[in-house]
Image (cartoon, rainbow, N blue to C red):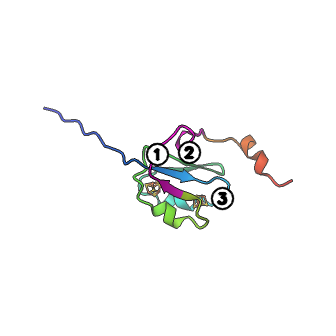
Amino acid sequence: MSTTTIRKKPNKVLLLDRSTCISCAGCVGTCPDLALDMFGLDLQVFQDKCTYCTICVRFCPVGALSIEKREPRPEDNAYQTPKTAADFLHRAPA
Ligand code: SF4
Ligand code: SF4
């Protein structure tokens, strides 16, 4: 007989404020569930791996991460594709 375990996710989402994030990458190493990764200077959040433990939220030196109680929406970080170097040109100093 086989059993299937269905992991019920909490009704939460980990949000990244990209205008505040300084791309220090420090939070990536704090996550025990590998739910954060850097693509160039762009932090990506993988909601499917996140357990909303708040470690990264408390670590971030600029308060760029927060947890909200609601279902993830398509516009949330989890669904953004990694950016290329060209995408960062708008951030470059004039
Ligand atoms: S809340 Fe916890 S599990 Fe989710 S990304 Fe941050 S450190 Fe990882
Ligand atoms: S610790 Fe904060 S500032 Fe650094 S990469 Fe993570 S979210 Fe961005």
Considering depth in this image, is 5 or 65 the residue closer to the camera?
65
Residue 43 location, x and y as percent? 59, 51
- Mark 3 CB lies closer than 8 A to ligand 2: yes
Q: Name the residue type under label 3.
A: Thr
| C-alpha separation, residue under disc 2 versus residue under disc 3 | 14 Å
In the foreground, 39 or 72: 72
The residue sitting at 51% across, 40% down in the picture is 73
What percent of the width, then of the height, locates residue 27? 53, 60
In magenta segment, residue 69: yes
Question: Can you tell me whether the CB of the residue at mark 1 lies under 8 Å from the nearest atom of ligand 1?
Answer: no
Horizontal arrangement in the rendering, residue 54 relative to residue 9 (left or right):
right
Q: Is residue 28 visible?
A: no
Whether pointer 1 and pointer 2 mark residues with C-beta atoms closer than 8 Å, the reply is yes
- CA–CA distance in space, label 3 to label 1: 20 Å
What secondary structure is the stretch in magenta mostly built from?
loop
Q: Mark 1 or 2 closer to N-term?
A: 1
Position of the N terminus, as image quadrant, is top left
Q: Residue at x 58, y 40 (%)?
A: 80
Q: Are marks 2 and 3 in contact (CB under 8 Å)?
A: no
Q: Residue 20's mark? A: 3
The dot on residue 77 is 2
Q: Which mark is residue 59?
A: none
Q: Amino acid at mark 1?
A: Gln
